[in-house]
Amino acid sequence: MTKVDVLIIGAGASGLMCAIEAGKRNRKVLVIDHANKAGKKILMSGGGRCNFTNYDVSSENFRSSNPHFCKSGLSRYTQWDFIDMVCRHNIPYHERDHGQLFCNDSAKDILNMLLEECKNVSVKVQLKTSVEKIEQLADNHFVVKTNNETIECHSLVVATGGLSIPKMCATPFGYRVAEQFAINIIPTSAGLVPFTLQPEDKDRFVELSGIAIDSLVSNSRISFRENILFTHRGLSGPAILQISSYWKPGEEIKIDLLPDHDLLSELMDLNKSHTKKKLKTFLVQMLPKRVVETLVNQELLELSIADISHKQIAIVANDLRQWIIKPNGTEGYRTAEVTLGGVDCNQISSKTMEANDVKGLFFIGEVLDVTGWLGGYNFQWAWSSGWCAGQYV
């Protein structure tokens, strides 16, 4: 039997961060993962450049059934702490819109940094290792049987992620561990995910595939301003991915395609000036021609703005600034960047990440019911929650 102080299941962002911190405390740490490579989601993130954190991080950038849970971790290991590590390793990075930080070169830089830090504190990372059985002993130690060996540990850390992107080896394993120890699971669903459209809308908008437009996307609870992207299946782009984490099946969303324009006033003023400019000519100055032709009545487009009634102007402004669409659904876990829901944070210590009623059992990262916005927030939660657990395991 292999004996260690800390066994971490999952060699992703949170698991490796936890391992580094536990190793610094001279704990004997073993990280195991069923995949053939550590940090697969790190490597694919940000188009291969890894959006590793954000300059502006607060609890407002996360959703959870316990909205206060993430505050402690985020305040104790901040984005600045992780940026310091990146700088110590001389990894070049740059800022994009909304404070998002990306590697200049490759996501491999972040993974290699984490693995080097693990090596420096004698952490062992063991891949192609599947867990078959977990038992808790009378002394609160755990015995974990894998396909390779049996491991005994003082502290067991579940860092197995969620269900998003199954081709990256995502499984519901972490939820099964929680259920084994009578810890509640908040129902899961796909988050940060493209929408699919109703059949009639899909047919109507398929010709717009590939067009991106800066838009304000809203439901009754929240709004996001970024690009939307028409796809051959539906709608994607940053604003759509963001709102998807706050969308409920059957709910409508509202899209303002011209958030910087008071289109109603602009058209009314032109109408009063008796301009002979065609409506179409005016609108294609602001929006792609194909979008205008799809969303606005064809007959109106060919009229001069002076010849359009005030009622018709209101309809045009409404079509482009309050475009209402009811998604058919989402593309699901296959393309989702995160999993909503997960291990109930009400049963986990926000300070240590240890289960309240199961001594020595810890949950970190995406397996918990904490989901960040698009923009580096989910990685920051991985770093913060992993760091917190690493102080106590």
Image: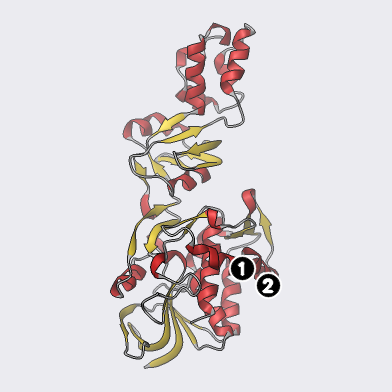
Q: Quadrant of the N terminus?
A: bottom left
Out of 383 and 347, give the one closest to the viewer.
Answer: 347
Q: Residues within 10 Å of mark 1 (few under 14, many from 20)?
A: many
Q: Amino acid at mark 1?
A: Asp
Give left or right: position of 33 versus 59: left
Residue 273 in percent (x, y) is at 64, 8
Residue 235 can be seen in this image: yes
Vertical comparison of 154 with 334: above or below: below
How far across and down, in percent of the image, does residue 41 sit? 48, 64
Query: Residue at point 37% right, 35% down?
Result: 326
Helix, strand, or loop for circle 2?
loop
Residue at figure coordinates x 44%, y 49% from the top left: 245
Q: CA distance from mark 1 to mark 2?
A: 9 Å
> What residue appears at the point 55 percent right and 28 percent down from the top-left corner?
288
Q: Which mark is residue 109?
A: 1
Picture quarter containing residue 90? bottom right
The tag earlier along the polypeptide, 1 or 2, is 2
10 Å crowding of disc 2: few (<14), some (14-19), many (20+):
some
